Structure formats: structure tokens, C-alpha cells
Amino acid sequence: MPAPTVIAISNQKGGEGKTTTAVNLAASIAAAEHRVLLIDMDPQGNASSSVGYTKGVAEQGTYDLLMGLAGPAEVVQTTELPMLDVIPSSMDLAGAEVELVEVEQRETVLQRAMASIHEYREYEYILLDCPPSLGLLTINALVASNSVIIPMQAKYFSLEGLGALNNTIEAVREAFNPELVVEGIVFCMFDNRTNLARQVVEEVGAHFEGLVYETRIPVNIRLSESPSHGKPALLYDIESKGAQAYLQLAREVLARREGPAQEAPAQ
């Protein structure tokens, strides 16, 4: 059975659309009939609650997997989408940063756990929602991944966050994971009416040639509302601009990797 494509959704700056992208891209790829696993690596647990697993709903989750307290059969949960599973963030995950310091080869704990996940179920894509900080949870996600998708806003300070993350990716590549690449950069909460937004897109495109997705995720109230209902946007309101944008992003991600014949169906 072929190994899954593992993609970290990461940005060390908060408020850039990271969790929204992780949840809705995972759901949109699943809607295209690819089996997807979403792993919530963020102690805040927002990705988990966005697919129906608020804190305390699942007894075990990412923490238990990382610390060797449970295997995939105990931590993998189903969602409303038949092709999408999740390993939710548990209440103990915040302590993992400290506890992992004492673990041998602490940077590769998740990478080693991936083997047991692969044996448990045949996923095509595994998406990791990373914390908005550079710690052992983020490092583990980057070491375990084939590539990184970077969500960001088209704002000046977002460029600084992009530079910091790129430095981190380079460091992880040199020390642990030489195959790690930037999969793509997606602009979130995008407003094309401002000159600054267009300038930031132009500057990022010049520095990361060919990596900026054509799809832009707009400011959309339905995207903001859907997590409180425990649903990805396409289950909350598939006709909304936000849901349609993520379906388009999924088509673009799949087309880059698999060619036009494997694109997600238009909704």
C-alpha cells in the first residue's frame, strides 16, 4: 500500500488562517473522494472542535499517540464526512511540549507514529494542523511531513512570519528531513481591493516563484460561523464563498500533485 502524502499546515504567526485552512482543505479533499486524516497538533484544539470534537468529547487524542499511551485504533475518530477522520487534540497536549523534552529522539516521535497509522488505515492524505509557535509539536509535524502549506494574510507583518517559518523549514530540512518542501502558499482573508494586498502577493510570488496558489480565500462570515457548529464550511453552507474557495483550493492542490484527471469535482 502506498504511503500517504503528509502535509503540515503551518505558520508561526497566529491569526493567518492556519486552522481554517487545515480543516476546510482536509474536508474538501475528502469530498473529492480521497481518504484523509486530519491530526490536530495544536493544544488549543480548534481544528478538533471544527469537526465536532470539542475538548472532552474524545477521551484520547494526539497527546496519547505521541506519548505512546494509545495507538491509532484508540485515537482516530470519524467525522460527518465519510472520507475524513481526525485525531483530536486532547486536554493534555499542552503538556507534551515539556514532556517530550525527556523523550529520546524527541523530534521524530510523530514520524515514528506515522508507521502505525499507515498500518491501521490506508489514507491518501494526512494533514497536520500545527500550533502557531516554534516548539516540539511543530518540529515533530515538520519532521513527519513531506511538505508544508503556508496560509497567510496579505499584510506587511505576515511577511515577517513567512520569513521566520521559511527559516524553520530550512533548519528542519538540514537536521532531520531533507525531503521537506514548501507545497504552496495560500492567501487567506483576502481583500483584492487594497493596494497593499496586491503588493504583498506580488512580493511573495517573486520570492516563492510557482508556489503561490491561484485560489484566494476571501473574508467570509460562513467560514467564521462554521466552527461553532462543529462543521467544515462545505457542510455548514456549501454555497458560501468560503466553502467554494476551499473546494477550489483542493482542486488546485490535487491538480498540482496528481494532474487534472484527479481534480475534485465542481460543486
Image (cartoon, rainbow, N blue to C red):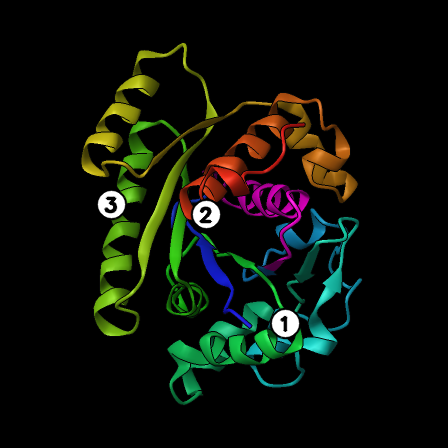
User: Badge 2: how crowded within 10 Å, few (<14), some, or many (20+)?
Assistant: few
In the image, 133 versus 247, the foreground residue is 247
Q: Secondary structure at mark 3?
A: helix
Mark nearer the viewer, 1 or 3: 3
Residue 201 location in percent, x, y?
A: 30, 26
Residue positioned 66% across, 48% down in the render: 33
Residue 155 location in percent, x, y?
A: 34, 27
- Residue 149 marker: none
Residue 243 location in percent, x, y?
A: 64, 30
- Residue 258 marker: 2
Residue positioned 27% across, 40% down in the render: 160
Range covered by the magenta-colored residues: 15-38
Mark nearer the viewer, 1 or 2: 2
Query: Is label 1 in contact with label 2 (beta carbons under 8 Å)?
Result: no
Residue 254 location in percent, x, y?
A: 49, 43
Which one is earlier in the sequence, the residue at label 1 or at label 2? 1
Mark nearer the viewer, 3 or 2: 2
Mark 3 residue type: Gly
* Residue corresponding to mark 3: 163
Image quadrant holding the N terminus, namely bottom right
Residue positioned 76% across, 54% down in the render: 79
Mark 2 residue type: Glu
User: Badge 1: how crowded within 10 Å, few (<14), some, or many (20+)?
Assistant: few
Which one is earlier in the sequence, the residue at label 1 or at label 3? 1
> How far is disc 3 from disc 2 in space, using C-alphas?
29 Å
Mark 1 residue type: Asp
* Residue corresponding to mark 1: 92
In the image, 252 versus 2, the foreground residue is 2
